[in-house]
Amino acid sequence: MTYLSRYSRIAVFVMRYRRAGVLRGVPGHRRGGELADERLPQRLVADLERLGPAFIKLGQALSCRPDLVRAPFLAALTRIQDRVEPIGVEEVRAVIARELGAPPEQLFRFFDPVPLAAGSLAQVHAVVLPDGMEAVVKVQRPGIAQRIRSDLDALERLALTAQRHTEVGRRYGFVPWIAELRRSLLNELDFMAEANHLETFRRHLEGYRGLYIPTPFFEFTTSRVLAMARVRGHKLGAPPAGEAQPPRAELAGELLSAYVDQVFVHGLIHADPHPGNLVLMEDGRLGLLDFGMVTSLSPAMRNDLLRLMLAAADGDGDGVAEIGERLCVVLPEMDRAAYRRAVCHVVLRYASASDQSRLEEGRLLLSLTRIGADNGLRPPAELSLLGRALLNLEPALARLADNLPTREMMRTRLLEVVAAQLLRPVSQARGGALLLEAQRFSINAPGQLGRFAEILADNRLRVRIDGLEESHLIENLQKIANRIAAGVITAALLIAGALIARLAPAGSGYGYLAGAMFALAGIVGFGLVVNALRRDRSPPDDTDAGR
């Protein structure tokens, strides 16, 4: 199929559903919110599946956007299936030979020609490595990368047109959203990146003995072939027929804590933890699969999300609204009062929920996403992805153990993360950065204050100040500058002392130097506090009082 014919087919699909009521803010519903045709959601899913991998992933991405997609379509999109026929074994052999330099029969002690699983991007075969270890190889479908790039190019052109010429396209930011979809999909096509994710998650979660991340084998891995340890057991979503599963509350607790760590400690999240990607292994551990779909969070976003979750647990709707607004892009039409009212209502309902066994955090984040979009905010994609991941985590926890106090477990783990962050020692790199920042501030502060004083002296600052002469203002600013400089020096002494104490060899004598720095910092800090309190509490002099 040529690019033009493919683009035409995609354009026809978009036009077919443009006014079907799929997107919020676009006509297509009858009065009362009913669909014009109740079969439309199922038809949309079927058409997306027929269009291929890029559109299956588009449907999965849309299922994470309650701010963008109406509820009937959202429910249908969560059931979208990645159903394809497996490719022939000769094609698999050809890809392996091209990528690894030899056919599978020469590379492995055993290669099973019958696939264990087949998806739209790749299929998986069982192998035995030369050292006798059981493994699997994930082989990318031939030509799939080129087809996906072509489909993404077409989607980007359509998104650009919609964003330029429609209100809904501008409000929801179709272009950056499709760009994020492109980044995510192309990352899934890079199997070397997935192998690195496996290695990273193994390191991050090594303290959780009940969880297992497959070992990647880099000597048999390229961007189109991935070899990793085989995980034997049954998927959590498909237990053996007629076999009762014992409750595993401890394992469920580890899984929940591990996800809290992924989000708020490491900032790298396994974005699809539904029961089909979790395997209850023969040795009782829980294996996590499919690390192609991974979401990352910046340190600033992690901190904001942590504050948001704690504020929600405390029922602080205003605090949640403030943090939510900071996370989003504010559009000119934002209705701040309506946004805060809606957020406070949702947070109150969340905080007062009586069922402690339901993991409501995912629903909370998705509700905040929808409320933001309804009131002139553009939420970040990470917020929806995290909400969907936590929503998918709930049935997995329920299959491991019923009636777990997941809300209390989540709250406890969040507080543990906060405590760990407060007590975490300053790393060498972070300490060095703080010292450089303190040095830069101490060097620049006097000059900046001097320039500010010159602006005041030249009467170039249009600020009305009653009852204060310039000489007194400059004198007060100089006092403030002195206090800031003393505070910076105190902080620098503390950081330098901590670094020396941590990095100096035992018995080298540098410990005395660190102790001296701590003592000097304590003296300077104490003197600064006493001086500030004494001056701030002293009455003004007679000349000031008479004015």
Image (spheres, helix red, strand yellow):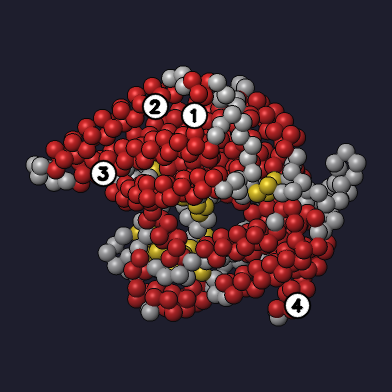
For image coordinates 66% across by 39% down, the residue present is 368
SS class, disc 3: helix
Q: Which of marks 3 and 1 is in front?
A: 3
Q: Report the quarter where the N terminus lies.
A: bottom right
Q: Which of marks 2 and 3 is nearer the N terminus?
A: 3
Q: Which of marks 4 and 3 is in front?
A: 3
For image coordinates 69% across by 67% down, the residue present is 156
Q: Which of marks 2 and 1 is nearer the N terminus?
A: 1
Residue, disc 1: 411
Distance between the alpha carbons at the discs numbered 4 and 3: 66 Å
Can you give x and y, in whole percent of width and height, for residue 165 in the image? 81, 62
What is the number of the mark on residue 5?
Answer: 4
Q: Report the quarter where the C terminus lies.
A: top right
Q: Characterize the local packing of mark 3: few (<14), some (14-19) or many (20 or more) Cα atoms within 10 angstroms.
A: many
Q: Looking at numbered disc 4 in the image, what kind of residue is underneath it? A: Ser
What is the number of the mark on residue 496?
Answer: 3
Corner quadrant of residue 529: top left
Corner quadrant of residue 309: top right
Q: Earlier in the sequence, mark 4 or mark 3?
A: 4
What is the number of the mark on residue 532?
Answer: 2
Q: Looking at numbered disc 1 in the image, what kind of residue is underneath it? A: Arg
SS class, disc 2: helix
Q: Earlier in the sequence, mark 1 or mark 4?
A: 4
Q: Earlier in the sequence, mark 3 or mark 1?
A: 1
Can you give x and y, in whole percent of width and height, for residue 370 in the image? 70, 42
